Image: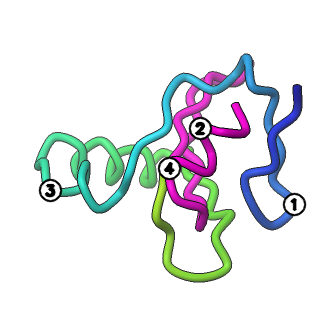
Amino acid sequence: MIIRLGSNTFRDEKDIVGVFDLDITSQSYITRGFLRASESRGEVVNAAEDIPKTFVLCNENKGTEVILCQSNTKTVLRAV
């Protein structure tokens, strides 16, 4: 099943590895470091039109991808 994660960003649900709340997970220096490193490698896709609330970790053929989305974690998990 295809999931819409925001502004013209769609992923197959089988490619989704995890769905994480940015408010909670960004408190950890490990997660902040992961997101910083992913952004520097060009693996972050901003699908949020406003402040992102969730990040979705996807396993693509080309590697790992982090998608920032505006929907809260529960909404994304209901779609999966």
Q: Quadrant of the C terminus?
A: top right
Q: Which numbered disc covers residue 77? A: 2
Q: Looking at the image, is mark 4 or mark 3 earlier in the sequence?
A: 3
Disc 4 is placed on an element classified as helix
Spatial CA span between label 3 and label 2 = 21 Å
Residue lying at 24% horizontally and 54% vertically, measured from the top left: 24
From the viewer's perspective, tell me whether residue 66 is left or right of residue 47: left
Q: Which residue is mark 4?
A: 73
Quarter of the image for residue 71 reads: bottom right
Spatial CA span between label 1 and label 2 = 18 Å
Q: Which residue is mark 1?
A: 8
Q: Nearer the viewer, mark 3 or mark 2?
A: 2
Q: Looking at the image, is mark 3 or mark 2 earlier in the sequence?
A: 3
Q: Which residues are magenta?
A: 55-80
Spatial CA span between label 4 and label 1 = 18 Å
Q: Amino acid at mark 1?
A: Asn
Q: How is the image coloured?
A: rainbow
Q: Which residue is mark 3?
A: 27
Position of residue 61 measured from the top left corner of the image (x, y, whole percent):
74, 18
Q: Amino acid at mark 2?
A: Leu
Q: Amino acid at mark 3?
A: Gln
From the viewer's perspective, tell me whether residue 3 is left or right of residue 23: right
Q: Quadrant of the N terminus?
A: top right
Asked if residue 56 is among those painted magenta in the image, a careful observer would answer yes
